[in-house]
Image (cartoon, rainbow, N blue to C red):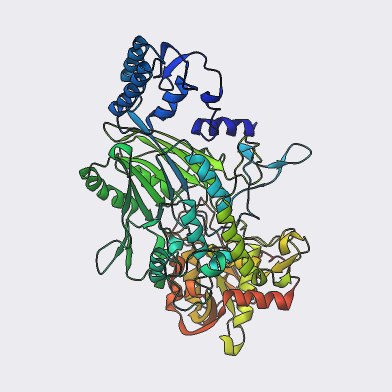
Amino acid sequence: MYPILMLLVIVGLGLIRPASAATLPCTGNVIIGEGDPKIVTSVANKSVNGVCINALIVDTAAEGANYGNHGEFVSQVSKLVRDWAKDGQITVQEAGELMAAAAKSHVGKTMTVRLIAFNDFHGNIDGANLTLRSDPDGICIRNAAGQCAQAVPAGGVDYMAGLVRQLKEGFPNNVVVSAGDLIGASPLNSALFHDEPTIETMNRLGLEFNAVGNHEFDEGREELLRIQKGGCHPTDVNSCQGQVVGTPYPFEGAKFSFLAANVVDTKSGKTLFPAFGVKEFTGKIKVAFIGMTLKGTPSIVTPSGVAGLEFRDEADTVNALVGNLKGHGIHAIVVLLHEGGVAPGSINGCTGVSGPIVDIVSHLDDAVDLVISAHTHQAYNCDLPNHAGRAIPVTSAGSFSRLITGIDLTIDTHTKDIIAIDAENLLVDRTNFLRMADPIQPVTSISNIVANYNTIVKPIANRIIGSITADITQTRNSAGESTMGDVIADAQLEATAPANKGGAVIAFMNTGGIRANLTFASSSAGEGDGKVTYGEAFTVQPFGNSLVVKTLTGQQIYDLLEQQWGTNQFPDGGRTLQISKGFSYKHTFVPNSSPLGGKYVCNNSVAVNSVPLDKSASYRVTMNSFLATGGDNFTVFNLGTNQLGGDVDLDAMEAFFVAHSPVPPGPQNRIQQVTACP
């Protein structure tokens, strides 16, 4: 039933345009306007110069989309009908009735602006291996029993661009926006080139505003400024491939605007990028887009990358800008916020919504009309109460280019404020799974750029580094441990255990740094033989962090483990550290139940090679460079001494696979969740 449902939704958003009345017999009477306010006249819908009157007036009116006010529409209709009467196409009486109907209609009293939004793209320019599954919406391939069994091919920047083109058809007033993490944590075909491919393809897709997300800061502020302004990377020869892939040389930079309302330089007091962008439409109708990232960004990126920057409260930042915008005659306000929530269920549902977005919206000024959220990689379409108790739309389009949110803003052309909003998350359907009459056509020029980058990176990406015996995933058990986390921590310990490499006896890996699974059936380009390529390994660990070994005391390690459930961490234990073989402990933390900030590690349960940890002794501990400077708010790592730098994390993983293939999934038995400590 879902394809029928989606068809109705897309018709409602105007994605499928009915056959033009110019190609059909002229039947019925002339109608002015659309929907409930329409006026049915007594004038026959006759042909004028070979085109039906209804077609001429509807094409002119387009629900007021081309008019800044009602008077402009009335003037245009009056001119048309007078010319028709003069030419004898209609009578003077008919002309008078049509002009009167135009004056009484609502056309031009409102304007429709089509807003096209997405979030958390993460450099996924190539959709060849991207899929989406949503059982509640029937977005799945069913087995013989009629049950959802497989995900549907979806995504890729060229197909995104094709859907954007469809969404713009018939809507001259439109704007394309992103709510952050456009770049960073990207696949190899974008990351190897410092995400220049993402920027170049987004320029051609027509992106206009992008709120900074936390991953925009992965390579630091100077690199982010280069991404906006253009120019080649100062040291990496992989940058500026325009002459090879068919884009300008040197790198052109983003033709769209980065927005950073709550990111302030502590020295200058100015925002790193503009706080908001404004787009003006017909009739001097202006819509403001306030863009920002989550205030907790410093705790989830490498501290050096955000040094000298202050990340301010999201709601307070928005509310402080409202007066300024109103002072400039701007009453339509949209927030692009790289923070979000969780709402299990339909991609257009809002069942059991939770997370930071709920609290942020509850503190927003009533002048804010719409929030486009991000960060959690969830797809939802909500109405959440603001500070005044009024419910406002809050959307999120999942991640990785697989969904786009089509949003129609109805704006009162007199007050210049938004009076109605209609939003739907739409599948970036690569195979016409929904059987649409107008399937998405990828934009060829963008497809060619992606293909050219793939050609450059292919020899690197397809190099076999080892194999696996079964799926190795980032899914954590109730204790917080994943099979992939075990393998990565083991690889990092092995790389740093030799005395000349640091003499480590324990390795910690941050959960957020594990970005993908290694799947036996899809490994090595889908051959199903368990082979693992460098490109697949890169997708798992795309950040290029180096390994660091420090000395910590036993007490500091206990303190470190307790920081996993600090007051600024996720209630589901999402920051649980992954640990290497030989290290183990027990805890009583229950995800989404235990209060944050408590003490949960069982005393005397922490052990190294089955020997209880001595709180007064010293231990050599491995971490990546992100954690080494207090990333994810693990400040205990900053207390370590006798630091020694090591290999890049991905190199350590490759060496591990070369030495141990086929690699089995980690045992997930190092962390134990217990009801009570002994």
Name the side, left or right, on which 341 lies relative to 439.
Answer: left
Q: Which one is in front, 51 or 229?
A: 51
User: Residue 110: horizontal and vertical position, in percent?
Assistant: 34, 30
The extreme bottom residue here reads 500
User: Residue 201: horizontal and vertical position, in percent?
Assistant: 51, 57
Identified at 33% across, 26% down, the residue is: 76
Q: Is residue 48 above or below residue 491?
A: above
Quadrant location, the N terminus: top right
Quadrant location, the C terminus: bottom right
Is residue 480 at least partly visible in the picture?
A: no
Q: Which one is in front, 279 or 51?
A: 51
Name the side, left or right, on which 101 lies relative to 324.
Answer: right
User: Residue 445: horizontal and vertical position, in percent?
Assistant: 56, 55
Identified at 63% across, 62% down, the residue is: 482
Q: Is residue 540 above or below residue 94?
A: below
Q: Which one is in front, 205 or 585?
A: 205
Name the side, left or right, on which 253 lies relative to 326.
Answer: right
Write down the quadrant of residue 260 in the picture: bottom left
